[in-house]
Amino acid sequence: MKPLNLSKPHVIVTVGIPGSGKSFFAEHFAATFKAPLISGDRVRKELFGAKERSNEQLAIANKITNYLLEEVLKTGRTIVLDGQTDLRSERALIAKKAKDYGYDPMFVWIQTESVTAKKRATKTTTDKSNINAEQFDAKLKRFSAPHLSEKAIVISGKHTYNSQMKIVLKHLVEPRLHAIEPIVPSRPIMTRNNFIR
């Protein structure tokens, strides 16, 4: 598909608990529309491999992820961010940074119930990069759901990528449709010799 040509660039930010499907959606959406993808987890894996996650590793990966975000924001292209978004305060910083560069932040909350998400997040992978049950429980406890003011778009982590993409695209395109809809007066307007309806 072609890159997204929106009237205003967006930072599409994935939000959700571990194993909800954030990375799956972010990777597919970025690939579909040839958008830059900034992945905090990918940064951490590139730096530290599949070792167990430490707080120091996460702090370093977050600093680099934030640096990458600032650099890519200079391009004016729509970006997909799959980073540290567990807390509302973290999301508020991302939104502020995006707005400072003239972007609209769009939070996409991928919802999956915790039992399924835990199975996904703790499942053994070939590179042993998944988290353990204790880490999952800690991240679940730390997670703060998006507030109404964040205007998050909610998609199911159990739906197919195509149905997820359609929901997000609908929200990206809606503002443009409202901007180009003709304004029809509710009552006739009288000009010199004609009525306009």
Image: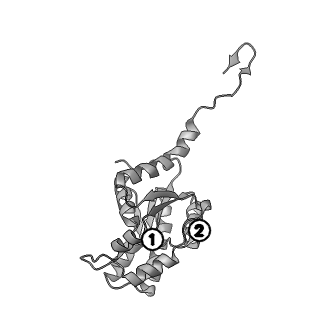
Which residue bears the numbered disc 2? 92
- The spot of residue 113 in percent (x, y) is 43, 67
Please identify the residue farthest to the top as the structure is shown: 193
Please identify the residue farthest to the left as the structure is shown: 126
Q: Does 17 appear above or below 30?
A: below
Nearest the viewer among 166 and 114 is 114
Q: Residue at x 37, y 69 (%)?
A: 116
163 horizontally vs 192: left or right: left
Callout 2, which amino acid?
Answer: Ala
Q: Does 105 appear above or below 8?
A: below
Which residue bears the numbered disc 1? 17
- The spot of residue 88 in percent (x, y) is 57, 70
Quarter occupied by residue 146:
bottom right
Q: Residues within 10 Å of mark 1 (few under 14, many from 20)?
A: many
Nearest the viewer among 33 and 169 is 169
Q: Secondary structure at mark 2?
A: helix
| Residue 7, label in figure | none
Q: Secondary structure at mark 1?
A: loop
Q: Residue at x 59, y 31 (%)?
A: 182
Choose the circle earlier in sequence order: 2 or 1. 1
What colour-coding does the image apply? one colour
Q: Residue at x 35, y 85 (%)?
A: 52
How far apart are the two marked residues, 2 and 1, measured between alpha carbons? 18 Å
- The spot of residue 86 in percent (x, y) is 50, 73
Where is the C terminus found, in terms of image quarters?
Answer: top right
Q: Residue at x 56, y 36 (%)?
A: 180
